[in-house]
Image (cartoon, rainbow, N blue to C red):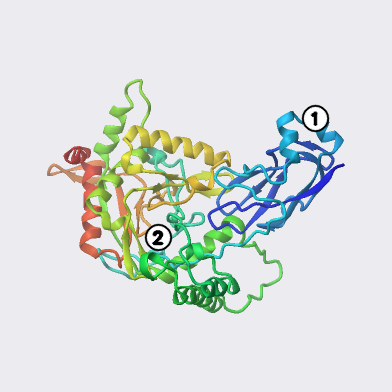
């Protein structure tokens, strides 16, 4: 006799709480095997095919294409052990279909649980650093608001493709999140009850007791933070807008909604400043042409700039950090996970190159090409879109020279690259036409002063003008 099981929308990871149905991959009455993808959904980070952990006959689909479902909401129901399923399934699939638990393979890195289990929403906690771009001199503030774009963790504008020699420089906007906390350290049942009553996920709470023990005061502080954010958000939202006849309303949801929230949080929290400099990129372009003259793998201009960034961050580690506002500490991070942007049909997607500091120029170029292709196919995993520590932003692809982008939360800095254009330039004491680019650095003034930011930017500019400068640190 068939047993009807309901499969809910699984936890897609990284704090995501909802997803939009893009395309159903199965029909009602269709036989599905264990772990067969049944629906394609879009989250604030990527397109994901969701496999069903049960084998059987689909008896119902919960939602139409375009509907937004919260995590834990019913997605499909499957008649497990139905004759149709038994005839089509292999022996391993029939055994899995008869099991009392899920297959555990809903998504890579995110397992399924028993069907009767109730999912618990993860409430985001922790305040981070983020901020926008007020133009100014080194360490200065004031000026115009920058143009921005990106996804959940966002900031800046950019894309793959561009103008002239700058066509391969990528732009940016990543959401950087940090490694998840370890095992929950709680002794008191009163603390657990307080967390349960207020919906606080203890895994996201930093304990202030001995050896990280979570105390009542820690939970109470975690409860206050969302409440304060809600008050700030309510004030920022203001009254509803009365739109004139014929006005179009575009819902702020999915990737666009996540970006909007990040932009707002960035502006609220980070005291940022921007410094910039013009650099002669003629020699950098010549180096790239020489590197690509042979038959080996081609190197992109974006990869060269990424390698310059990792070398600069090794000299100025203050900019590869985040601010822990709960403990009033600057956390300097051990590795560089570099975010860049890829323009896709669905908008700007921001992949992250893991351990960029340990890669060669060829390795960076290869990985960026792979991530870009995967992003355009809509197949990036959540892990490939998060945990960035620094962002490389190219707005030159839009034909502009400069911008002051919003810093990606919770990062501390972002390097911006304008278009590379032929301009008059004094070279070796004479006026000449050279390929000139404007570089800008927006940084969190809490992690460093203008001297550090200026030193970082000057080193980057020196490497652009004289790529041999990189050899000093090799």
Q: Nearer the viewer, mark 1 or mark 2?
A: 1
Q: Nearer the viewer, residue 469 or 244?
A: 469
Q: Report x, y in % for residue 222.
A: 48, 72
Q: Nearer the viewer, residue 337 or 433?
A: 337
Mark 1 falls on what kind of element?
A: helix
Residue bearing the label numbered 2: 407
Number of marks drawn: 2
Question: Which quadrant would residue 109 be assigned to in this image?
Answer: top right
Identify the residue at the far left of this view.
Answer: 429
Cα distance, mark 1 to mark 2?
A: 53 Å
Mark 2 falls on what kind of element?
A: loop
Specify the quadrant that holds the N terminus.
top right
Q: Are marks 1 and 2 in contact (CB under 8 Å)?
A: no
Residue name at image x 26 percent, y 45 percent: 311
- 162 relative to 64, above or below: above
The answer to whether one can see residue 344 in this image is yes
- 196 vs 114, left or right, is left
Residue bearing the label numbered 1: 88
Mark 1 vs mark 2: which is more N-terminal?
Answer: 1
Question: Which quadrant would residue 472 be assigned to in this image?
Answer: top left
């Amino acid at each position: 006799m068939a047993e009807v099981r309901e499969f809910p929308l699984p936890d897609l990871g990284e704090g995501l709480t909802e997803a939009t149905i893009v395309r159903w991959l199965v029909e009602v009455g269709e036989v599905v095997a264990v772990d067969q993808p049944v629906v394609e959904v879009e989250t604030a980070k990527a397109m994901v095919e969701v496999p069903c952990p049960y084998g059987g006959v689909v008896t119902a689909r919960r939602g139409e294409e375009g509907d937004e479902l919260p995590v834990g909401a019913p997605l499909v129901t499957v008649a497990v052990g139905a004759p149709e399923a038994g005839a089509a399934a292999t022996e391993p699939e029939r055994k899995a279909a008869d099991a009392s638990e899920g297959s555990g393979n809903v998504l890579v890195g995110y397992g399924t649980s028993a069907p009767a289990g109730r999912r618990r929403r993860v409430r985001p906690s922790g305040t981070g650093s983020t901020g926008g771009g007020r133009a100014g001199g080194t360490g200065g503030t004031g000026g115009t608001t920058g143009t921005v774009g990106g996804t959940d963790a966002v900031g800046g504008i950019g894309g793959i493709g561009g103008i002239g020699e700058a066509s391969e420089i990528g732009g940016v906007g990543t959401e950087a999140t940090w490694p998840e906390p370890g095992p929950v350290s709680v002794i008191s049942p009163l603390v657990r009850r307080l967390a349960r009553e207020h919906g606080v996920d203890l895994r996201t709470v930093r304990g202030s007791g001995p050896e990280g023990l979570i105390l009542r005061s820690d939970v109470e502080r975690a409860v206050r933070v969302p409440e304060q954010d809600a008050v700030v958000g309510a004030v920022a939202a203001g009254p509803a807008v009365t739109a004139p006849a014929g006005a179009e309303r575009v819902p702020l949801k999915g990737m666009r909604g996540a970006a909007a929230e990040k932009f707002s949080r960035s502006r609220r929290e980070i005291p940022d400043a921007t410094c910039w400099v013009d650099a002669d990129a003629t020699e950098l372009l010549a180096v790239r042409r020489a590197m690509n003259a042979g038959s080996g793998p081609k190197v992109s201009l974006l990869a060269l700039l990424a390698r310059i960034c990792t070398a600069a961050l090794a000299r100025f580690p203050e900019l590869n950090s985040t601010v822990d506002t709960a403990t009033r500490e600057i956390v300097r991070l051990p590795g560089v996970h570099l975010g860049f942007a890829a323009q896709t049909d669905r908008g700007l997607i921001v992949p992250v190159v893991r351990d960029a500091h340990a890669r060669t120029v060829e390795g960076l170029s290869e990985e960026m090409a792979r991530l870009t292709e995967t992003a355009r196919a809509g197949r990036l995993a959540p892990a490939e879109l998060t945990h960035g520590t620094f962002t490389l932003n190219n707005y030159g692809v839009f034909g502009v020279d400069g911008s002051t982008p919003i810093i990606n939360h919770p990062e501390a800095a972002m390097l911006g690259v304008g278009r590379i254009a032929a301009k008059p330039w004094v070279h070796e004491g004479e006026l000449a036409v050279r390929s000139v680019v404007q570089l800008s650095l927006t940084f969190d003034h809490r992690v460093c002063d203008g001297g550090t930011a200026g030193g970082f930017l000057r080193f980057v500019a020196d490497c652009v003008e004289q790529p041999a400068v990189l050899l000093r640190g090799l």
